[in-house]
């Protein structure tokens, strides 16, 4: 029997965001209990809020924007690789992770998975890829990388890692809740909001396990 795991973060006012990003303002502007015909809400937030997709345009001038991202890359067979006790995921760590040749979609499950959902203050020492790891992914022809934090890159290599991956048209999915996803084969589905011309978009994502 197929098990479906929702790996998306809840979006709400006051949630964790990247330092310097706009926070989330989600509020009801019409309330039935106050006599309105119906309930109606509005939201204001950055496009890289919660579980979200980075399009190449995020770091590459003239790169693809969200509405141009191919659905056949955003959805399909994937491989979850676990990295316990590792903060910097580089070429050496990826080589040892048992990632099958021909993998198109790679999900990185790290120690972030145990803390992301409950985190209220940003922490710089999260786990992520370094530049050698990004180059390894590009060299393997991987087309999508997902990770269990708000950035795929370690804090001090945010620019180089994003430029290496997005410059090769690798789609990035950040902010995945991977705690209950086992390592190994799965099916991944990620549907970003179709924001025309945008460098990123919030998304709903799920993993299916046989």
Image: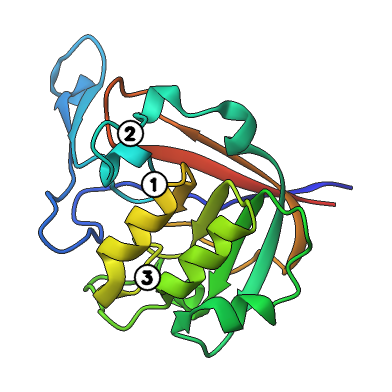
Residue at the front extreme, as displayed: 139
Question: Residue at 30% across / 20% down in the picture?
Answer: 196
Give the answer, above or below, for where 65 lies relative to 128. above
Q: Which residue is mark 3?
A: 118
Which of pointers 3 and 1 indicates the residue nearer the eye?
Answer: 1
Give the answer, above or below, for where 111 lies relative to 70. below
Give the answer, above or below, for where 33 lies relative to 143. above
Give x and y (percent) for residue 154: 34, 74
Within-10-Å neighbours for mark 1: few <14, some 14–19, many 20+: many
The tag earlier along the polypeptide, 3 or 1, is 3
Residue at the bottom extreme, as displayed: 85
Q: Which residue is mark 1?
A: 167
Q: Which residue is mark 2?
A: 63
Marks 2 and 3, how far apart in space? Answer: 34 Å
Within-10-Å neighbours for mark 3: few <14, some 14–19, many 20+: few
Helix or strand or loop: what does disc 1 sit on? loop
Marks 1 and 2, how far apart in space? Answer: 8 Å
Give x and y (percent) for residue 182: 72, 68
């Amino acid at each position: 029997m197929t098990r479906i795991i929702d790996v998306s973060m809840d979006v709400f006012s006051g949630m964790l965001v990247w330092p310097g990003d706009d926070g989330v303002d989600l509020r009801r502007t019409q309330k039935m209990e106050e006599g309105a015909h119906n309930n109606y809400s509005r939201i204001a937030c950055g496009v890289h809020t919660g579980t979200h997709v980075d399009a190449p345009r995020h770091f590459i001038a003239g790169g693809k924007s969200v509405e141009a991202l191919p659905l056949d890359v955003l959805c399909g067979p994937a491989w979850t690789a676990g990295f316990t006790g590792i903060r910097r995921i580089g070429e050496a760590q990826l080589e040892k992770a048992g990632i099958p040749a021909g993998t198109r979609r790679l999900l990185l499950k790290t120690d972030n998975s145990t803390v992301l959902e409950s985190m209220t203050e940003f922490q710089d020492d999260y786990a992520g890829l370094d530049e050698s790891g990004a180059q390894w992914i590009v060299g393997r022809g991987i087309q999508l990388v997902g990770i269990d934090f708000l950035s795929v890159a370690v804090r001090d290599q945010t620019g180089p890692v994003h430029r290496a991956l997005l410059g090769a048209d690798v789609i990035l999915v950040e902010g995945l809740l991977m705690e209950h996803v086992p390592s190994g084969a799965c099916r991944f589905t990620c549907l970003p909001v179709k924001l025309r011309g945008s460098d990123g978009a919030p998304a709903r994502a799920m993993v299916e396990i046989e």
